[in-house]
Amino acid sequence: MRAGANLTSRVVENLFWLGRYSERFDDSARMLRVALSRVVEAGGGKTPAVASAMELALILGILPKPEEDTPVVDGSEHVLLEAIYDPKQPGSLSGNIRSLMWSATHVRERLSLDHWHSLNRLQREQQAAQKTHPTLTEAIAFLDRVLGVSSSLTGFAMDNMTRDDGWRFLIIGRRLERLSFLANAISNFLRMPSTRSPGSLEWLLELTDSIITYRSRYSRAPELMPVLYLLVFDDSNPHGVLFQASVLAHYLERMARELGEKSESNLPDVLNRLRKFDMEKLVHLEFNECTICDPCEQLAALLKELDNAAVQLSEWLGMRYFTHVGDVSRQTMAL
Amino acid sequence: MARTLLAIYPQSARRYDEMLSAEGEVRPHWTKFFAHLDAVAPEEMRQRLEFVDRRIQENGVTYNVYADPSGSDRPWALDPLPLIIAPEEWAKVSTAVAQRAKLLNAMLADLYGDQTLLSEGLLPPSLVFGQHGYLWPCRGIKPIGGTWLHNYAVDLARSPDGQWWVIADRTQAPSGAGYALENRLVVSQVFPEMFRDLHVQHLADFFHDQQDGLAALAPVEGDEQPHIVLLTPGPYNETYFEHAYLSRYLGFPLVEGQDLTVRGDTLYLKTLRGLERVHVVLRRQDDGYCDPLELRGDSALGIPGLLNVIRAGRVAIANALGSGLLASGALMGFLPAICRKLLGEELAMPSVGTWWCGEKPALDFVRENFNDLVIKPAYPTQRKDPVFGYELKGEARAEMLHRIEARPHAYVAQEMVNLSQGPTWSRSHERRLIARPVGLRAYAVATAGWLFGDAGWSGACCDRQQYTHYFDAAGRFVKGCLGIDRWAGERIHHAQAVDWGSRSGAGRCQPDFACG
């Protein structure tokens, strides 16, 4: 009997979502930390960096969308704190942690004790934080700790779990979530006029945890082309778009080989077009002076397509391996 | 040698003693064990107790594998002493249990089929249709092999004259067999030499019977292997530990409702490698929750369309959906006549005196004899605790009576039985036996050839007098190890979990009755 032949879809689905949620809360924590630290730096003022970071967080659904009938409250503080601590807020960090715990509970017998302890620490951090009314500085410290736990979770996933089908779905979940986040974030970043102000490329590098690489490689202030190269095209950057996509493609291929079904995804196609994108077009662009120009728009559109392909892939995985919708349609036709 | 353990053993004139005869002599089937026990040095006994505690502690670890949402752990004290029952007596008990299982199976077939019991007046329709346990959508279904009741458990008590009585029937998804197995493994290691000398039959046979019985029903096609799964409501269920334990022991995959799916008229398990057909579902989930399409619509645990697969005869459910109906205590009074009618024989073991308040004369009787009765909900779906008549005074009593009169059909009254007592080992003394009330849960399982193999079960020994107190409203037997947190104020000191069949004669094998 092949290993993993007895894995039920429910277990695999929960592993997949464990992967997605652990990446998702990492992404939102980074986005919120970027915005929060910009707000703290600005000392309450609204600098262009604050404005652009908040705008992207809002577009990505990490900040709650202001409802039409509620009066706009000035200042970003409480919106940010809400997005961190309020579990009822859709897309909030707390909500993501909760979903993460939910998936983890269902696959608990597959996680090592240390792995489980890390998850528990995360939940305790969150519960402890909810009881007090944290200041912005405390919130940043909280995010630092959360990201610390997040990296330990990544470590457990990479180094403590047996490489079976279930594990591959966990990793696929992580890569897929990160791919979708990066593609979506960078695409919107390129399309937002507010990012053309100073300081934006810095926080984009911070958001993608690539600032150290950038500095050591280029030793100069961020410029559009090298930043995009690092974040999109450099396939040695674990926070880069192409890196996620190629890891994802690798596992999908392996799964197709072992589980005997090729994914009906247009991911490879979009990926090919992205690889062929001519970086030269961006060389002479001064990002600050660029009003959303053609090359920027083209790249943004490609990245958006990539994001869509990732979402579709997730749906397909769900239907094919978790709910087995494909099987029923075939069956109905056979009947 | 210190004085014998009997010197300070509290024999009671009001109770039957499992170990001692009325004259204070050790009963023949206990002599060997008692002699051994009497000879064990206190130091060694202490070590054995520590062994039990350590094993329980380790079991506690398995309890805690799944986070308890309420954070309450379950104290579980296992007494190291077995309860020994003579083989000839056990033979009688097991025959009676098997007869009862057969009877209840026949009743289910009738009530979901021709309903002759109703048309001939052997059962009041209001008793059957008045409860949620009767699942209308299951009417007319004929389960595979005509078997409704694959697993049956019955709670027994012994009155002062030595007679066994049925206190309650468990027909839904009886729990406890897994715990029994585990307790047996612990206790057999405490007295390994006795376990060998008394020729206690191994529990494995009971579980083999269950495996074979279920496999025989699997509606396989072609060269399909029977695929049997164990359906659990999930980690939040209080007996989840047992489900996981049994699933490993029996080799049936442990699945939740969302693992299964109905396509066409076939039930499948969803796995990574595709859909795998399921032939038999051993369910540990209440029947009402099994199919949100036709039964409880609010069930998130069910499998939509399951009933259709059952109707098509393409899956066997153990126990069949709808079987929870017969766990109602209100039926007990009607069983003797039904037994004569359906099986053509007398009911072998009497049920404890039970009055269903839905009948006028019974209600009058209950009103007059309130002090001597235990008031219980009539249907297992009602989540209410039993109430002792003599404990209710003044307003509380008036209110209770008022409630009964408002909905008489929802209540039964049972007479209180003075339970028998058996020895347990005192933990607070150097070397002493304490007498505790004894109850017994016996299991029957439908075997491949429609024979009932049966296995016995230990009872819980409690420091409360009335046995009936140890059933909660849902009809679950409250054992020391599980469910105790549902019983505020009740502390069961000892769950004595293993019955040993002693073999008195030579060469004859003791029927296994310790499925504890």
Image (tube, coloured by chain):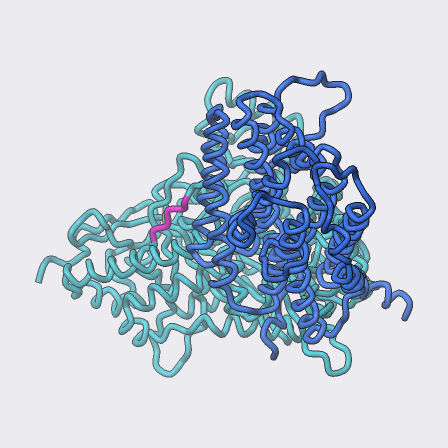
Chain colours: A blue, B cyan
Residue A180 coordinates in the image, percent (x, y): 70, 51
Residue at point 64%, 51% (across, down): A226
Residue B282 coordinates in the image, percent (x, y): 63, 63
Please give left or right for residue B438 compared with residue A184 in the image: left
Q: Is residue A2 above or below residue B334?
A: below
Q: Residue furthest front?
A: A284
Whether residue B440 is in magenta: the answer is no
Q: Is residue B364 above or below residue B453?
A: above
Q: Is residue A250 above or below residue A88?
A: below
Residue at point 77%, 46% (across, down): A296
The part of the image, by quadrant, that contains residue B283 is bottom right
Provide the residue span drawn in magenta.
Answer: B73-77
Please give left or right for residue A49 compared with residue B246 in the image: right
Please give left or right for residue A216 compared with residue A203 in the image: left
Residue at point 40%, 70% (across, down): B87
Residue at point 73%, 83% (across, down): B223
Can residue B117 be seen here? no
Taking depth in this image into account, of B93 and B346 the one nearest to the observer is: B93
Magenta-colored segment: predominant secondary structure = loop
Q: Quadrant of the C terminus of chain A?
A: bottom right
Q: Quadrant of the N terminus of chain A?
A: bottom right
Whether residue B76 is in magenta: the answer is yes
Residue A269 coordinates in the image, percent (x, y): 80, 63
Please give left or right for residue B441 compared with residue B359 in the image: left
